[in-house]
């Protein structure tokens, strides 16, 4: 008898040590940001890999927030070496995020496995930045700080003990039966015995995103030149080819700020040597200098896999993984020894001679190319953890090289993850679906990353122009001609329109730069979903919704998803057209909207149908909005260069705009060397529009020359 009770006691103890359910204890770690530690978190996670510091003072300015969820409704259970997380969902709640998705904006109802990978055509969690962060239409966000492959049931599972259970129905007799009954929770499986969870307060969804970005150091602030135009030239180009290409841009009057060299600048690629090919580039230092003299910076493509023929191969070998990629050694960038050798080579050979940045390729996937999950790394981190964080690591440590020189960089990368908001990199891929590229642009704003819908080549001039129009309204205006050798003027029938759009990109640099500054200092994503816009209607006209759908929040949600128009900065709504389309519908949030090109009134809280012609990408401006522009120069303003402004005002309301200014190239803004100047447009006593700009602050950078005013709405 006694031994039996001892046995059950031991059993209970054992059981208790394997499974425990806990109500997370929340601590406010920064204004409006709460953290809970569940079980025993692993020593390596996304935030450790990213290594950024929260901007607490900026977080303090987002405004007050209270804990956004009912705490007892959040559950965390650790059992079987895994952590089971559950967060409540309300009936009418929609959720966004879970990384850089390409086909869907609404994530409620999804089952995802978050896994860094090359996007494979399905929103299943495998993508370039599978950020474990979701945002609710009820105005909060949740972030899981884990470098594991997380399985997410985003309102899919139905628990027996649900507080709001769906009713069981008979499929034979009840037409409202659904294969996906209502679910009241987001559930996440973390394959580890513990994890840190963060909740970001609102009150609005955009506030939660701002808090997330600021918690990760704020969005990146690119150099001004990064917002100009970039051409990635064909692979195997030599120094003269590059010079000739730059000359052609200049002669033809197309703007250009930096040129990307694709495979061929290195003596070996796939795997790489990280050393110049001396046949194609006999004097790299002179080449980079010569290009700089004509106003063009150089960006270099690489993948980080080290060729056995690289001079760093032997020294880096002990700090590389058990498995290779294309027979190249895989540096363990979580180890200082590996970083010192790898980035030491880049610095000595390229950064120190003036190379402006990198395009870091192949750090995402494919499974058949990348190291398998059975790989071991000398740091002891799992292959899975390295897969989830490799993009973060290469961004972090390459950016550090530039920071050490007090020079900003702006480059490209094919993988990122949670914690990466502040890295000066834009994501791209090979998938090349124009419409899905725009949905990715929308989702980038939820994922804390930047994305470019790059143009490569097209079947027709129409497609070329349509693609080009969208890169102009994206974080990086780029042609990637690595395979095609296309130039902006390659399609003669639209060459002039392409030129006008690339010049428009340049004219808008003062607007873009100020919007990036807001991304940095306030956390507001520049390119983002309509759903984050005040006055955006979640209601669909009744007749559009079938009765059955109305019962099922997920199906109903899908019927309302808007994934082909987006906000660009605080004032612009961009509604691209794709090949074959001559007209489209545009959903205008409440408030008056005006045509960007003409200033004409277009509508208010309604759906309009537009037929803009091939020459125009529809862009609409808020009432009272101010768009600061500069002359259509062929290069972005140089460090400290004084530039005239043309200030455009739209609509019937008075307006104001905070114009950001700094030297455009260094990190001196972190020491306070920046200014915000207020541009105001109001009616004078006679009812005429009148514009003014606040005086420059003493001792602060001032690059504003003459200011002219253009009141667009007559
Ligand atoms: C791909 C990359 C392209 C281009 C190409 C060069 O992986 O996505 O943009 O750089 O490699 O080989």
Image (cartoon, grey):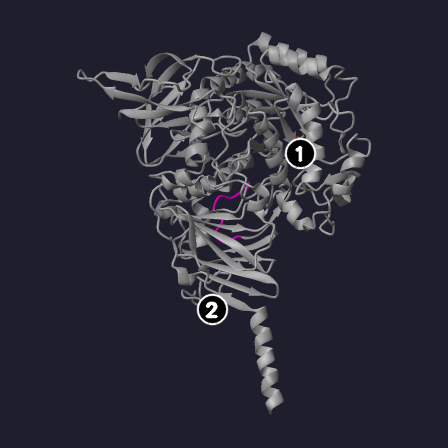
x and y percent of residue 698 in the render?
A: 36, 18
- For disc 2, does the CB lie below 8 Å from ligand 1? no
x and y percent of residue 110 in the render?
A: 52, 52
Nearer the observer, 59 or 249: 59
Report if the CB atoms under discs 1 and 2 are less than 8 Å apart: no
In the rendered structure, find residue 361 and report the number of the disc placed on it.
Answer: 1
Q: Is residue 44 above or below residue 279?
A: below
Q: Marks 1 and 2, how far apart in space?
A: 52 Å
Q: Quadrant of residue 328?
A: top right
If the picture is divided into quarters, which one holds ligand 1? Answer: top right
Farthest-out residue, bottom: 1
> Magenta residues?
101-110
Q: Which comes before the other along the chain, label 1 or label 2?
A: 2
- For disc 1, does the CB lie below 8 Å from ligand 1? yes
Q: Residues within 10 Å of mark 1 (few under 14, many from 20)?
A: many
- Magenta-drawn stretch contains 107: yes
Q: Going by the image, does 144 lie left or right of 586?
A: right
Helix, strand or loop for disc 2: loop
Q: List the residue tagged with mark 2.
A: 170
Helix, strand or loop for disc 1: loop
Tell me what residue is drawn at x 38 percent, y 53 percent. Answer: 68
């Amino acid at each position: 008898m006694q031994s039996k009770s001892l046995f059950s006691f031991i059993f209970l103890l054992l059981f208790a040590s394997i499974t425990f359910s806990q109500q997370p204890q929340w601590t406010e770690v920064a204004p409006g940001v709460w953290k809970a530690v569940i079980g025993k978190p692993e020593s390596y996670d996304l935030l450790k890999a990213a290594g950024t510091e929260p901007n607490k003072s900026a977080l303090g300015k987002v405004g007050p927030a209270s804990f956004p969820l009912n705490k007892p409704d959040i559950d965390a259970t650790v059992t079987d070496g895994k952590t089971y997380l559950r967060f409540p969902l309300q009936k009418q709640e929609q959720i966004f995020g879970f990384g850089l998705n390409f086909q869907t904006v609404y994530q409620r109802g999804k089952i995802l496995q978050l896994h860094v990978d090359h996007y494979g055509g399905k929103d299943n969690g495998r993508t370039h930045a599978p950020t474990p962060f979701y945002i609710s239409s009820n105005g909060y966000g949740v972030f899981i700080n884990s470098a594991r492959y997380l399985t997410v049931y985003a309102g899919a599972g139905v628990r027996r003990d649900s507080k709001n259970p769906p009713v069981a129905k008979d499929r034979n007799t009840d037409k409202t039966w659904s294969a996906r009954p209502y679910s009241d929770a987001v559930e996440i499986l973390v394959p580890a015995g513990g994890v840190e969870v963060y909740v970001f307060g609102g009150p609005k969804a955009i506030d939660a995103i701002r808090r997330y970005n600021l918690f990760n150091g704020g969005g990146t602030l690119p150099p001004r030149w990064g917002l100009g135009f970039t051409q990635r030239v064909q692979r195997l180009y030599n120094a003269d080819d590059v010079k000739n290409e730059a000359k052609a841009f200049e002669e033809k009057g197309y703007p250009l700020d930096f040129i990307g060299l694709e495979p061929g600048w290195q003596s070996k690629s796939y795997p790489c040597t990280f050393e110049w090919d001396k046949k194609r580039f006999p004097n790299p230092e002179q080449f980079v200098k010569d290009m700089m003299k004509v106003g063009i910076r150089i960006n270099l493509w690489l993948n980080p896999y080290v060729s056995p023929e690289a001079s760093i191969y032997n020294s880096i070998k002990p700090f590389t993984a058990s498995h290779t990629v294309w027979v190249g050694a895989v540096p363990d960038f979580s180890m200082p020894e590996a970083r010192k050798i790898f980035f030491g080579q880049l610095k000595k050979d390229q950064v120190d001679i003036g190379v402006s940045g990198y395009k870091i390729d192949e750090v995402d996937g494919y499974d058949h190319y990348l190291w398998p999950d059975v790989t071991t790394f000398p740091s002891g981190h799992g292959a899975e953890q390295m897969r989830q964080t490799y993009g973060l690591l290469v961004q972090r440590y390459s950016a550090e090289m530039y920071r050490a020189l007090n020079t900003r960089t702006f480059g490209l990368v094919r993988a990122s993850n949670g914690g990466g908001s502040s890295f000066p990199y834009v994501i791209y891929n090979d998938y090349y679906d124009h419409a899905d590229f725009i949905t990715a642009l929308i989702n980038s704003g939820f994922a804390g990353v930047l994305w470019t819908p790059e143009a490569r080549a097209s079947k027709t001039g129409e497609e070329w122009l349509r693609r080009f129009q969208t890169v102009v309204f994206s974080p990086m205006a780029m042609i990637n001609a690595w395979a095609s050798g296309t130039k902006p003027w390659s399609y003669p029938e639209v060459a002039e329109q392409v030129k006008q759009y690339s010049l428009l990109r340049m004219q808008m640099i003062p607007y873009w730069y100020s919007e990036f500054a807001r991304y940095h200092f306030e956390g507001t994503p520049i390119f983002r979903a309509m759903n984050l816009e005040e006055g955006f209607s979640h209601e669909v006209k009744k007749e559009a919704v079938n009765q059955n759908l109305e019962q099922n929040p997920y199906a109903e949600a899908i019927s309302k998803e808007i994934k082909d128009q987006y906000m660009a900065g605080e004032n612009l709504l961009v509604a691209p057209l794709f090949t074959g389309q001559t007209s489209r519908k545009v959903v205008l949030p409440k408030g008056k909207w005006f045509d960007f090109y003409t200033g004409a009134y277009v509508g208010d809280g309604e759906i309009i149908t537009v037929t803009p012609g091939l020459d125009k990408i529809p862009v609409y401006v808020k009432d009272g909005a101010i768009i600061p522009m500069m002359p259509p120069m062929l290069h972005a303003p140089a460090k400290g260069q004084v530039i005239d402004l043309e200030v455009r005002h739209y609509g019937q309301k008075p307006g104001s705009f905070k114009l950001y200014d700094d030297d455009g190239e260094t990190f001196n803004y972190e020491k306070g060397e920046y200014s915000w100047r207020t541009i105001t447009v109001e009616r004078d006593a006679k009812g005429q529009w009148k514009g003014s700009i606040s005086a420059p602050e003493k001792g602060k950078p001032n690059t504003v020359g003459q200011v002219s005013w253009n009141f667009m709405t007559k």
